[in-house]
Amino acid sequence: MGIVKIDDELHEEIRKASSVMVRSINAQAEYWIKIGMLAEANPSMTFSEIMREQMKQAEVDLGKVIGG
């Protein structure tokens, strides 16, 4: 674990987003970092495709989640 320097304005945006997404500020920052890394590693994939693939890798049954 380490310390990451984050601009005050970005930290405020993370704080606001974390309240909407019901995550801690750290969890929101980690989420955005992970999604950013996945987007850079998979530039041809959309956000939805990236999320679908992550759910598949985690063995989440989306049919059960969305009632289908």
Image (cartoon, helix red, strand yellow):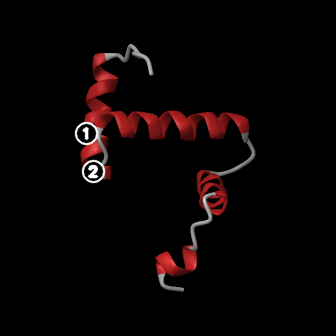
The image shows a total of numbered marks equal to 2
Name the side, left or right, on which 3 lies relative to 51. left
Residue drawn at x 66%, y 57% as measured from the top left: 57
| Residue at the limit of the structure toward the front, as seen here | 1
Residue drawn at x 59%, y 51% as measured from the top left: 47
Which residue is the site of mark 2? 20
Name the side, left or right, on which 21 lies relative to 57. left
| Vertical comparison of 40 with 64: above or below | above
| Vertical comparison of 64 with 12: above or below | below
| Vertical comparison of 44 with 36: above or below | below
Instruction: Determine whether label 2 and label 1 are within 8 Å by CB.
Output: yes
- Give amino acid for label 2: Val
Q: Residues within 10 Å of mark 1 (few under 14, many from 20)?
A: few
Q: Position of residue 59 (x, y in %)?
A: 62, 65
Name the element at disc 1: helix
- Give amino acid for label 1: Lys
Q: Position of residue 22 (x, y in %)?
A: 28, 51
Which residue is the site of mark 1? 16
Name the element at disc 2: helix
Residue placed most toward the observer, 22 or 9:
22
> Residue 63: which numbered mark, if any?
none
| Residue at the limit of the structure toward the bottom, as seen here | 68
Q: Quadrant of residue 18 in the image?
A: top left
Q: Quadrant of residue 26 in the image?
A: top left
| Quadrant showing the C terminus | bottom right
